């Protein structure tokens, strides 16, 4: 019994000593990861604004809120859009098809058919999602815009930059362009 009491008192002294100092090692280990500059889930504005001082998965440091979503305006301007550096080779199209059916087709479908609501005629949309028919809307978008949309996502579309490489994204763009040429 005395041993248990001694251990308990020892633990209380150890924890109390650590919490007694403002920047103790235990306190830092517990709070620093949460208190760092980051996007907190469910925080107001977290879906549209990156916190100043955060770093994206591709290493871009956000130094001001004016940098948020600059890529959209650049990719909508034909003079500033990013050009596709990957040729539409058979290997690129095969990889793009594989990645398209893995990540894109489940929501956007592989055709331009729409539901009565004007969305893609997919099972996901039947369950309440709001995914447009990709092949219906992509002719008006630049290759760089589609690439960036895959990488950074959108209001509802998930970010796929972590799951795809640069080449995968360009291969998907090549596949979409090839698919558009074969659509009636």
Image (cartoon, helix red, strand yellow):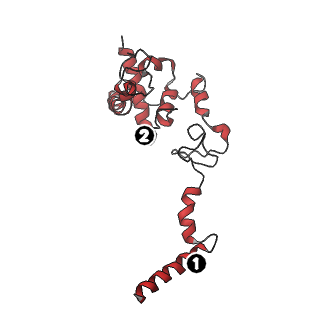
* Quadrant of image for the N terminus: bottom left
Image spot of residue 86 (x, y percent): 43, 30
Query: Secondary structure beneath disc 2?
Result: loop
Q: Is mark 1 in CB contact (under 8 Å) with mark 2?
A: no
Can residue 83 be seen in this snapshot? no
In the visual, does 162 lie left or right of 35?
Answer: left
Can residue 162 be seen in this snapshot? yes
Between residue 140 and residue 122, name the one nearer to us.
122
Could you say which disc has been placed on residue 79 in the image?
none
In the visual, does 61 lie left or right of 169?
Answer: right
Q: CA distance from mark 1 to mark 2?
A: 48 Å
Residue lying at the far front in this picture: please name it: 1
Binning the other alpha carbons within 10 Å of mark 1 as few (below 14), some (14 to 19) or many (20 upward) gives: few
In the visual, does 20 lie left or right of 129?
Answer: right
Which mark is first along the chain, 2 or 1? 1
* Quadrant of image for the C terminus: top left
Residue 166, quarter of the rendered image? top left
Residue at the spot x=55%, y=47% of the render? Answer: 40
Q: Is residue 155 above or below residue 18?
A: above
Residue lying at the far top in this picture: please name it: 184
Image spot of residue 137 (x, y percent): 47, 19
Q: Which residue is mark 2?
A: 165
Query: Secondary structure beneath disc 1?
Result: helix
Residue 88, quarter of the rendered image? top left
Residue lying at the far bottom in this picture: please name it: 2
Residue at the spot x=48%, y=36% of the render? Answer: 151
Residue at the spot x=57%, y=61% of the render? Answer: 32
Q: Which residue is mark 1?
A: 17
Binning the other alpha carbons within 10 Å of mark 2 as few (below 14), some (14 to 19) or many (20 upward) gives: few
């Amino acid at each position: 019994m005395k041993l248990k009491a001694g251990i308990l008192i020892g633990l209380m002294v150890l924890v109390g000593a650590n919490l007694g100092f403002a920047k103790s090692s235990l306190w830092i280990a517990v709070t620093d990861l949460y208190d760092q500059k980051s996007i907190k889930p469910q925080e107001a504005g977290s879906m549209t604004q990156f916190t100043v001082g955060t770093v994206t998965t591709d290493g871009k440091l956000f130094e001001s809120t004016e940098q948020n979503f600059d890529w959209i305006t650049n990719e909508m301007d034909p003079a500033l859009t990013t050009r596709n550096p990957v040729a539409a080779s058979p290997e690129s199209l095969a990889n793009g098809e594989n990645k398209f059916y893995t990540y894109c087709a489940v929501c956007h479908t592989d055709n331009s058919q729409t539901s009565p609501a004007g969305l893609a005629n997919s099972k996901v949309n039947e369950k309440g999602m709001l995914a447009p028919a990709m092949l219906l809307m992509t002719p008006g978008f630049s290759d760089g815009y589609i690439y960036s949309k895959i990488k950074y996502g959108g209001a509802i579309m998930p970010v796929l930059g972590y799951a795809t490489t640069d080449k995968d994204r360009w291969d998907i763009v090549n596949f979409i362009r090839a698919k558009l040429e074969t659509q009636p």
